[in-house]
Amino acid sequence: MAAFTILYCILFVASLGKNNRFLIWLIASTYILLLGLRALTVGVDTVTYSEIFYDITTYGYNGYPEPLFGYTIENLAHFNIEYISFQFLLALFTIILVSHTCSKFSPAPIKSLFLFLALYFLFYAMNVSRQILAVSVLLMGYGLLYKGSILKFLGCVGIATMIHYISIFALIVLIFRKVNITNRLRLWLILAASFAIGLILSDSLIIRMLTPIIGNYAEYLLNSGSNGFREESRLLLAVILCLFWTTLFVLITLSSKKHLLNNLWFKIYLLGVITNNLTLRMELGLRVTMLFSIAQIILFPLYTINNKFSRPIYGYYIVSLFATLFFFLFLSNNSAGILPYHFATSN
């Protein structure tokens, strides 16, 4: 934990400086090494991914997991590589996509890369590697949609869906981008409604809603582990977390310049907050929320230069405070099972 605390502090200080291309790729390279060379004990699902890899390379692809992911492993079997090499490739593609998108669409790429760590996405990538790869593809797709290319966005959603089926929900962005959300009262009503609905939704209702879209994965979202819905003790923590992120959203909305509220990145950010509220009773609700919450790493730097404070950097301090509280709470509880961290000793 000490090493990650030091890394966090270094990157936060770096994020306060000017953009530097060398530093951007130095941070990206550090992320690639941390992700790609981790031991099988780092990340709750890492061993499972290893087992899937060796099962496919031995017996061939049988339809699980998603085809682009599965057939890639099957083709890599011809090169007789070990899992650690495949893991490194996953890390390489994920971080290159994230770094490229940040460099192209963020006004402060180093801030964006710091937020990729601070908002725990780097550590999620040590656990649900396949989904974070899909999310990195979607992030690039959002950037392309921001530039007005609907077809390229659809292409990215298609690729992401072939990596992780749940990515199909990103199509909601196409509809939501047309919504005018400059009316703040309407925003508060939407947030309140999403929170209330999230508390009362039943598992059977959610399954009926999701199955036509993502098939059997809907039941997996709800029934993975001992219980797909949170127990009372964990539900209270989920409620607190929803209120935590909603509070940040309200602060950002109140202090943003009005034009930012109709920015595509802000709308995707709003979708993330709404989804977090709607899925607060689901143990794996975060899997859906991440499809949209990844936009925060672009939106928050935009907010830093588009707020009403006398010194715009104050906006970044607010975001950083919330991110820091979230990061160290999750790290201290070893969320995603990334502690103790070890590098892989061999293939």
Image: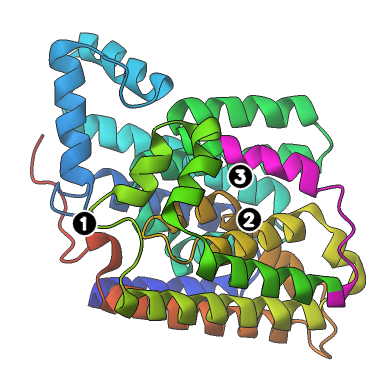
Which quadrant of the figure contains the C terminus?
Answer: top left
At x 86% / y 63%, what residue is drawn? Answer: 181
The question of residue 318 being in magenta is answered with no
Q: Mark 1 falls on what kind of element?
A: loop
> Callout 2: 10 Å neighbours few (<14), some, many (20+)?
many
Spot the residue most to the bottom: 310
- Residue 333 position, x and y percent, is 26, 76
**C-alpha distance separating marks 2 and 3:** 7 Å
Q: Earlier in the sequence, mark 2 or mark 3?
A: 3
Q: Earlier in the sequence, mark 2 or mark 1?
A: 1
Judging by the rendered image, the residue that carries numbered circle 1 is 226
Judging by the rendered image, the residue that carries numbered circle 3 is 139
Q: Which amino acid does label 3 sit on?
A: Leu
Which one is nearer the viewer's eye here, 258 or 215?
215
Q: Can residue 336 be seen in this view?
A: yes
Q: Mark 3 falls on what kind of element?
A: helix
Which one is nearer the viewer's eye here, 122 or 233?
233
Q: Is residue 5 visible?
A: no
Judging by the rendered image, the residue that carries numbered circle 2 is 295
Q: What residue type is labelled 1?
A: Ser
Q: Mark 2 falls on what kind of element?
A: loop
